[in-house]
Image (cartoon, helix red, strand yellow):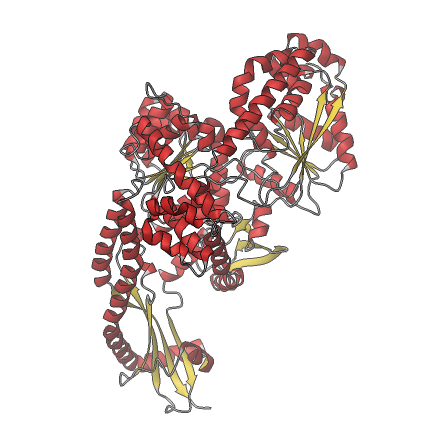
Amino acid sequence: MGARAQLLPHQIYIAHQVSMRHAPRVLLADEVGLGKTIEAGLILHQQLITGRTQRALIVVPDSLVHQWLVEMLRRFNLAFTIMDDERYAAIVEADEGNPFESAQLVLCSLSSLTLNEAMYEDALLASWDMMIVDEAHHLQWNEEQASSEYQCIEGLAREVAGLLLLTATPEQLGIESHFARLRLLDPDRYFDLAKFRQQEAEYQPVSELVNQLLADDAQQTLSKQQTIIEQYLGQDGYLALENAENFVTARDLAIRDLLDRHGTGRILFRNTRDVVEGFPERHLHAYPLTAPAEYIDGQADADVLARIQAERILQDSDDWLDTDSRVTWLAEWLSEYKSDKVLVICAQAETAQTLELYLRVNKGLRSSVFHEGLSLVHRDRAAAYFADEEEGAQVMICSEIGSEGRNFQFSHHLVLFDLPLNPDLLEQRIGRLDRIGQHHNVQIHVPYYEHSAQDVLLKWYHQGLNAFEQVFSAGGAIKQAVNESLQYCLLHADDEKSISLLIEETQKLTAETLNILQQGRDRLLELNSCDLPVANDLVADLHEASNTLELASYMDKIFDEYGVDQQMHSADSIILEPGNHMVEHQFPGLPEDGLTATYKRHRALVREDMAFLSWEHPMVLGSMDMIINSDFGNSAFCTLERDDLPAGTLLLEAIFIMKCPAPRALQVGRYLNHSYLRIVADEQGRDFNDVLTESSFNEAAGRIPRVTAQELVRHARPKISELITQAQQLAVTKQQQIIDQAISTMHRSLQPEQDRLTALAAVNSSIRPEEIAYIEQSQQLLVDYLQSAQLSLDAVRVAIVTQG
């Protein structure tokens, strides 16, 4: 619940399914734009919180290192250390041991591990609980040989317990490449490509059966499917469907059984836009412009990249901004759309900086710039200025790399100042706005020079791939197929015949690829990747558990008690600063210069510069630990107005905590539903717990001045000691009952899952033996640890009875 992310059913479902496993090893293969990075972050975050994971390594392409750093920090409050060549060499030179053991959470580029053998060896020697690999589909493998990058990840995969591979969809990869990813997850099962092809073919009838069961006339045509249903579910399975009072419920149970038993569903999750709702439409607006004479004269000696990014040619003159007709168009267009937020993306950081300065100084527009040269703090400030609805920037100018990892879906106008040569990069640009949660159709604006390379590239993307108005994940493969023709046409923009042939060939390849993707649509896998009713229930539970009002009230009290200054910032946000009379020298998670925070998820999604306070935020968790591990609030003295007890009677309210030394990974707290025990006793050892409930005690309690309380304690110390002894004796009588109940709860929770996996392992080889062994071992360990649990006195409140 603590992630700075929308609670999207398909993401929450995957995170829930995977994060509950011991050392999960899965492929995350959602279509572009569905949030694989967030899914991986949710899984890792939950594994860290529950103690199942303590050390994690993330390996990504060079261009994505900063994106992952930002995503993990801003969304999940996970501070990763980038292990690059410079940092690695510095730690080695200082002789401080294995550099990869200098931090618990490490982020590293694949090229660093591949090119630096010593670095790779140290990464292998460091113990990791989990590894995440992004862009795993770029790891090349075939039966004859594997690339050095693949071998690098393969070596690490053998050493780590948990493994998340983020990859393209299986349909994009092809069966051989898909098999190569599965080899990394489970080399013992996926060792023979021919056998894998055979297994995949055997799963096809199961997928077709699921389609038949989901058809509108499934109940009427059930008898036609009897043979295949009995083949996979047995005669009882067929009779359960045939005789069901509620066919839909019985059908859903049958499909769930099929999902559990067959296919790679436990290790492969893939959602598509076909089954995930909430995406906007995309509309292209192209603006043909006359090319400047300087561009026409300079392009003869220019390469393809310079012809597309015209400023590379025009920058030879000091006044290129006045010469470039795209700049003139942009300034005029922005003046016309002053009330709209506009995101402008260009390839180079230098272009972004120069363009933003020109628009702000020369044209008087409220603008902000975002590029890779900015520090994280300055990027946050730029993004916050753009997000501000009242006083913020109208336009944000982003460079290609600088915009990675940031989503600006509060804007729906995207201006592409130039076009990238890579279709995946184009989709990444559009994806800054085209995301779930975008409330408007995305308007894509492209200014371009007529009869130039820009014109050709625009036509190829739009007429050939339809890349502006639909997501097409196979664009990179098609570009590779037609690349020679594309490069020729970009250099010969006046060759209309060649351009037409290029577009025709691209259209044909696009249609064929889309048809193959649709025919290969795996309904079994789609259903396994998101059980929507279950997912919706999980989201509802998270909303209920978030309880922002309760959290805000709780933190208000803590801030007041510990001397943290709090003031309103704006709607749904506060400013927190260290006060002059702080109880603790340093408050958890609060920097010396303070911070701005919000309890509202919708606010945090727009304002990434604000801390998102949730029950899982480090400040909140740190505050709880600070209170638990200190003497603060663990003793009190009060009056208690009761007419049914003699005036002057002393009562003790004691809170005992059940302390169990089990490792965090065993999550013993899930089973200790009564992890604390409240005892109310008098000097005779009588238990008043049922008579004086917590609420009635609080209602009747009255404050006593500190000096008076200290004096009373001094005189009544022997009696108070006796009361504590009496309370401890009462607690001991209830300790074993709490332990027995916890053990029973644990077995009721874990044994059915162990039995289910054991049964499934007989028919589904994707059930890993170590998963079953882990549950069995966990039950044995939990019994031992719970039996050694002890009640410990945590807090007392002494009350002296008064009468009204």
Foreground pick, 506 / 575: 506
**Is residue 363 at least partly visible in the picture?**
no
Q: Is residue 28 left or right of residue 651?
A: right
Which residue is drawn at the image coordinates 50% and 44% (left, top)?
Answer: 75
| Residue 285 spot, x, y in % from top left | 71, 31
| Residue 11 spot, x, y in % from top left | 48, 46
Residue lying farthest to the front in this orientation = 223
| Residue 476 spot, x, y in % from top left | 53, 24
| Residue 466 spot, x, y in % from top left | 62, 28
Foreground pick, 77 / 337: 337
Q: Quadrant of residue 587?
A: bottom left
Which residue is drawn at the image coordinates 75% and 19% (left, top)?
Answer: 323
Q: Quadrant of residue 202?
A: top left
Foreground pick, 212 / 636: 212
Which residue is drawn at the image coordinates 70% and 11% (left, top)?
Answer: 494
Give the total of numbered labels: 0
Q: Is residue 368 left or right of residue 58?
A: right
Q: Is residue 208 above or below residue 358?
A: below
Q: Is residue 321 above or below residue 778?
A: above
Foreground pick, 376 / 740: 740
**Is residue 598 at least partly visible in the picture?**
yes
